[in-house]
Image (spheres, rainbow, N blue to C red):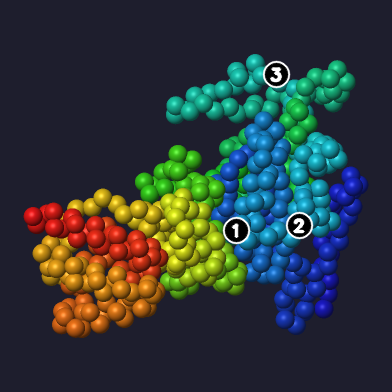
Amino acid sequence: MYVVIHRFHTFKNNKKQEIVRLYFIDSEREELEMAKIRTRFAPSPTGRMHVGNLRTALYTYLIAKHEGGDFILRIEDTDQERFVEGALDIIYHTLKETGLVHDEGPDKDGGFGPYVQSERVASGLYMDYAKQLIEKGEAYYCFCDQERLDSLKQNVGGKEISVYDKHCLSLSREEVEANLAAGKPFVIRQNNPREGSTTFHDELYGDVTVPNEELDDMILMKSDGFPTYNFANVVDDHLMGITHVVRGNEYISSSPKYTRLYEAFGWEEPKYIHCPLITDENHKKLSKRSGHASFEDLIEQGFVAEAVVNYVALLGWSPEDNREIFSLDELVKVFDYHRIGKSPAVFDINKLRWMNGEYLKAMDDEKFFEIAEPYIRKVIKKDLDLRKIAALVKTRIEVLPEIEGHIDFFEKLPEYDTAMYTHKKMKTNSENSLAILKEMLPMLEAIDDYSAENLHDRVMEFVADKGIKNGLALWPLRTAVSGKQMTPGGAFEIMDIIGRDESIARIRKGIEMLEKELG
């Protein structure tokens, strides 16, 4: 057995610390007993959490937990202009609601903090690392003003692009120092070669090689002293010991720049997993205009968090079998990121609706009532047993707002046409419906126990005594007490909920309507 030492640095209380990790290799098995996998979800607090961001968070969580690793939350707020008040609360709330509990983060210091980039800026660490690159010739100060930068813009294929021409790379050390001493605004740019190529490895796409001439000298440090997203990512991922990075495949084009930075520092690169694009049903990039682009949108539309997480997991990933319903714990056990596909994933709202319905059906009755009650109370103002109503609609809906349309008749008998009493299969029409209702009414009036069970027994006795088919009695009865063709539950359940007096009143109303029709 022998030891491999991996050294990297972190900052704590604004002081630089060296972290040493030991990896033990068993020479007989030739296996590496690796330290924990460490992944990070690094959202920007710019508003609601997009479905794509949620998938990134989920896959990042699953990769870590599948191997017993750590899932880190890091807040990337370097773009202060896009910061949205309250967005940080949204991030915390979404992770809590989805069950993606982080092991480290702004509220859980695991020794690699701070976990908010604006707080890390205050320590000066990004500037320190940028200056290291300058000393190595891998970066340089750029003092170009906006007017000059605008002059570099070109129109290529109808799109305006700007490629920096390395103008400030030629400045002498004395010129640079004079500009700095004069307080001239500057940015720090990466110094990428124009010849040769750069290759990076993606776990899904394999080796990707890009000609260096396509690599712009991207800005590392902005004029406001904040690092760019790209630079901060590299520095923070290294300092926090991140082993796997999950992101959308739109970042593949910028990945060689990351590789160049890692090589410049002499750091080990994490493993990259670039996920496919998520599109709408029309194969267009999922946007806010779709109405279901964020986690909050979906919750407001009556989807439950567990179903959303389950569905999002399948947007690009598939298990070995054809199974579709997974709890989060089950996903942790079976998730293999190598099974993430490369083709765009279509967000099918109807498929999500189906899955949500399955979750509602399987849900504990008390839990279902808890989430359904606000929707029920929007419609039901009378003193009725809301739990019984919830139990009836539980298996009939796909999303929670559908509850209202299923239960409105409990509150008030709707206006309906007597044509509803005619049902070919049940062999009912206005004439025999009227006769049946008039015959049942005295029996129903004499009943005090309006439980569904007792009503069932008494009506079935009536049916047996008359020697008629069940439907001949039950269809007119349900029509009279509901005024609807489709209802959650049958006549007995409905009558149980609305009670004796209301049931009798509705049956009398049905008789009156049929008598009026028939003259």
Residue that badge 2 annotates: 104
Q: Earlier in the sequence, mark 1 or mark 3?
A: 1
Mark 1 lies on a secondary structure that is: helix
User: Residue 269: percent from the left, percent from the top?
Assistant: 70, 54
Left or right: residue 133 compared with residue 157: right
Q: Residues within 10 Å of mark 1 (few under 14, many from 20)?
A: some
Amino acid under disc 3: Asp
Left or right: residue 326 compared with residue 19: left
In which quadrant will I find the N terminus? bottom right
Amino acid under disc 2: Glu
Q: CA distance from mark 2 to mark 1?
A: 17 Å
Q: CA distance from mark 3 to mark 2?
A: 40 Å
Residue at the image position 75 percent from the left and 70 percent from the top: 34
Is any atom of residue 11 visible in this view? yes
Amino acid under disc 1: Thr
Residue at the image position 61 percent from the left and 19 percent from the top: 150
Say if 146 sits above or below 407 in the image.
above
Q: Which mark is residue 98?
A: 1
Mark 3 lies on a secondary structure that is: loop
Left or right: residue 384 compared with residue 83: left
Q: Which mark is residue 145?
A: 3
User: Residue 493: percent from the left, percent from the top?
Assistant: 36, 69
In which quadrant will I find the C terminus? bottom left
Q: Nearer the viewer, residue 470 or 97?
A: 470
Q: Earlier in the sequence, mark 3 or mark 2?
A: 2
Q: Earlier in the sequence, mark 2 or mark 1?
A: 1
Q: CA distance from mark 1 to mark 3?
A: 46 Å
Is any atom of residue 268 visible in this view? no
Which quadrant would residue 210 be assigned to in this image? top right
